[in-house]
Amino acid sequence: MNTDPRSVAGKRLEIAERTQILIVGAGPAGIAAARHAHQGGAQVMLVDEHPVPFETMGESVPQIWGGRMGGSVRNRNAMTERMLEARPDLAELFEAGVDIRLGTACWGLFANQPNLGWIPGLVAGLADEEQGSHLVGFDQAIVATGRRDMGLAFPGWDLPGVLGAGAALVLARLYNALDSRRAIMLGSTPEALLAVLDLMSAGVAIAAVVEQAAAPAAPEDLVARIRAAGVEIVTGEAPRGVTSDADGVTGLVLRNRTIACDSVLLGVGAVPMIDLLHAAGARCAFGNDRGGFVPLLGAGGETSLPGIRAAGDCAGIWPAKSSDPALAVAEGRLAAGAALAALGLATAPADVAPQPGPAADLGEYRKAWVRASVVEAVAEMPVCQCEEVTAREILDVSPPRYLNAPHLPNLTRSLTEILGEGPPDPDQIKRLTRAGMGPCQGRRCREQIQALLALQEDLSLGVVPLAGYRSPVRPISLAAAAMPEDPAIAAAWDSWFGMPRQWIPFWDVEEHYTVAALATEKEHVSE
């Protein structure tokens, strides 16, 4: 039987280089994994997207930077030097001979699956400002991509100065480039209050911690440390807006007062950064005790994709782990030991990954914040900043404004009736309203949409499915996306762009694409 010359069958992927163990993320878990794997005799490549290009930071990727990046972040060399100063273990790995790629984003992982049977083993897509985009083959991967912050909409949250708590920490501790002197923290989770202490040690004054609940959400000993440091904790309040000038935020407006600040930090939820794993096809599930959706892991931190493992915050976030980096280090070492065993370089480790203890109801906490800040907002504002979609438009499933379609409110129908059987699906919302479809790829609105749908239908947060991720999971320029390819692919370029001729039997397709050929479309194979 002849093979369709326009299919991927028989095509060759241009694999630029290979490594035995690929580690994505140079935080505590990734560095520990790289050290253990290198000491075990494996060839190791450690990649980390920091320092992130300034243009990418402008899209609030991978964190919600909120326009509070100091001008020095434009200097890649200076930021690299600061990274090495902040993480001396990285310099030690350099000296030991580990292949470390800083400023290199991993935009995709690919493994043999039903739709990818033609892939030659495990492959990763990497991109940096110097080499552009290229493919790397590997035998084992450890994903240690860390965490990001949950977005929270309120009037004025799209102004410079509203940023994630994690983003502020990266700018202050990793880059020494946080353009903020007086900040307010929204949320009193353990992660938020630990960030308050770290930022204060970095020289940032914290004017207040604002919590919508009647009491702080962190353990009493941590709350006591915050109060002892002189930080006011305001409970039973949610943001009503901001005051601002040409440089952005100048104060946070509450119900009966305004607190002066130059930054508002979003600390209502630390979210495992599972973009790469979910886009690759790894099975994920909502873990109330692990910070949200996380990959389902087997022995040695292995995901449902053989050879791909997870460690650190992307495998789960809980208070003890946030306060003690040694837990993430243990996960990194365990994953590296299992990867070495899979390569025949060691015996399988007997250690067990750290497990979270009993947790408060994370889903109810996030829903309560979205209710207090978004649903009860004093003015309409975009929940999805990229596409400028409001909460009302999300819940009404309104078409994008640029279509100029008549507004047809669905006030008499539930979301379940609108979207079909089963729980509301954020991916359907995305396709119908474009919420979550912008350059930040839903990082600012993803959890808010999940909470809005749960509130609308009175569901627990984990019942609402995870919105899909697709590669590339990082914005990359068209120039960077260009990679060497098999000439046979270029010869049939039009088929890859979805032109109608791809639906015509390949033996009946003209050699060259012409507009005239489309005027008399032939029968499909299925007919």
Image (cartoon, grey):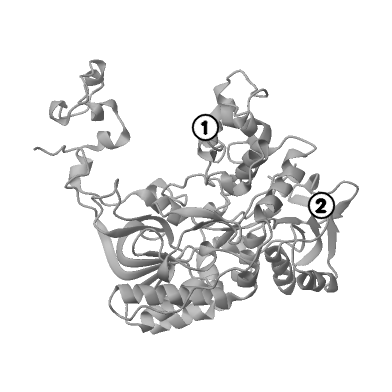
* Dot 2 amino acid type: Gly
> Where the C terminus falls, by quadrant?
top left
Frontmost of labels 2 and 1 is: 1
In this rendered view, identify the residue nearer to me: 402 or 408.
408
The image quadrant of residue 403 is top right
* Dot 1 amino acid type: Glu
Q: Which residue is mark 2?
A: 251
Q: Which residue is mark 1?
A: 421
Helix, strand or loop at label 2? It is strand
> Does residue 168 appear to the left or right of 98 in the view shown?
right
Residue extending farthest to the right is: 256
Q: Are marks 2 and 1 in contact (CB under 8 Å)?
A: no
| Residue 9 in sight | yes
Task: Please state the horizontal and vertical placement of residue 514, each as a whole percent of the image.
Answer: 23, 24
Marks 2 and 1 sit apart, C-alpha to C-alpha, by 44 Å
Q: Which mark is residue 140?
A: none
Q: Which residue appears at 20% of the width and 19% of the height? A: 522
Q: Residues within 10 Å of mark 2 (few under 14, many from 20)?
A: many
341 relative to 248, above or below: below
